[in-house]
Image: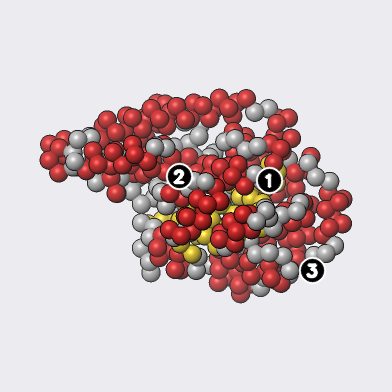
Amino acid sequence: MEDFEVTPWKASGDINYEKLIKKFGVSPITDSMKQLIKDVFGEIPLEVRRGIFFSHRDLDKVLKDFKEGRKPYLYTGRGPSGPMHIGHALPLIFTRKLQEKFDTFVLLQFTSDEKFLYNPELGPEQVYNYTFDNIRDVLALGFDPDKTYVIEDFRHIKYLYQIAVSVAKRITYSIVRAVFGFTNETNIGMLFFASIQAAPAFLGYFMDDVYNCLIPAAIDQDPYWRVARDVAVKIKLPKPTQIHGKLLPGLKKDVKMSSSVPESAIYLSDDRKRVKKKLMNAFTGGQPTVELQRKKGGNPSICVVFDYYKFLFEEDDKALKERYERCRAGELLCGECKMDLVDRVSRFLENHQKTKASIKDKDIERVMIDNKIDLHSLVNEFKMLR
Ligand code: TRP
């Protein structure tokens, strides 16, 4: 048994990402890959520079194709199991940046069905409420509405179904059992769902002239892509490619930000008072007393507060390094460091909440896939599916 666990539905323990790279059979983002990214984009995005997006499959192919004028499309998603926290926003913010860099369209899948199937307590009405609240949050992160297609599984299944069935035809029970750890008690909806999440990884080819599907997502979603890549060859479509992110650590030690542990997470809807309370109680690398901290310095490498600066709230590499060093030297005390973070997080959230409130129903309708592409033309294209 490992001392950590990462599945699409659960993450716990002190996650060792190097081990995950080996276990999942993905490739680390090496220095030469970073150089390639720089060649193509003119810079290395913060998330890659800092190792927050740290592994991939076939990203080199995507970048080389792009360099030669062959565009990818992007695909990512959100499982609406509750209100969103800043950990959920991380891969979406990165996806939005990639959308700008590649100047391409993005498919955003909201898996209301997955969450309904997985959680015995969740009724359709509640999932629906979360779904529309989450869509508002995601749009508020700044996706270009002209190049964004929202797929809400319940409402838009027609756009996915034929691809999903072709995919499902090539996945056996023994494969999903092995990849996802399903058991005899798992409901059959969950088995089929693997092909619903795979479908948008192929849908883009029927929509536009694109060469690759690049999926930016947290590494916990990887089992879905493993299955989808195996199937791609069989249905004669390109294998979906990925760039994988780390999970934002929770405020308490060794728990991922989780909707089921409210104090572990900062929600996109939190006000300053809540943010302050949560951050003041967060796990840090500080010493038990001020005297010891002055004498020995803190340990930013294990500090959740420092992680938040690194993952989201300090854009400037130099300032981040200075913060690290001042902590190590015992110059910066946890109280000051936390208060500074409270300010930054609250400012971010206030802006976010304002933007979210300004999103109208018609703005949501505008990005819904059924209002953007005609199903009949797609169905015609689907005829080539095997
Ligand atoms: N299963 C994901 C979740 O629970 C949602 C999702 C659907 C997704 N498609 C995706 C996430 C593509 C990343 C990329 O959050």
Image marks 3 and 2: residues in contact by CB distance under 8 Å: no
Which residue is disc 1 drawn over?
Answer: 105
Report the Cα–Cα distance between label 3 and label 1. Answer: 25 Å
Ligand 1 neighbours mark 1 (CB distance < 8 Å): no
Point out which mark residue 254 bears: none
Q: Amino acid at mark 1?
A: Phe
> On the picture, is 376 further left or further right than 284?
right
- Say if 32 sits above or below 154 in the image: below
* C-alpha separation, residue under disc 1 versus residue under disc 2: 21 Å
Do labels 1 and 2 touch, CB within 8 Å? Answer: no
* Residue name at image x 65 percent, y 56 percent: 68
Residue corresponding to mark 2:
46
SS for dot 2: helix
| Residue 366, percent from left and from top | 74, 35
Q: Specify which label sits upstream in the sequence, 3 or 1.
A: 1
Which image quadrant: the C terminus?
Answer: bottom right
**Where the N terminus falls, by quadrant?**
bottom left
Q: Is residue 4 visible?
A: no
Disc 1 is placed on an element classified as loop
* Residue at numbered disc 3: 386
Is 215 displayed left or right of 153 in the figure? left
Q: Amino acid at mark 3?
A: Arg
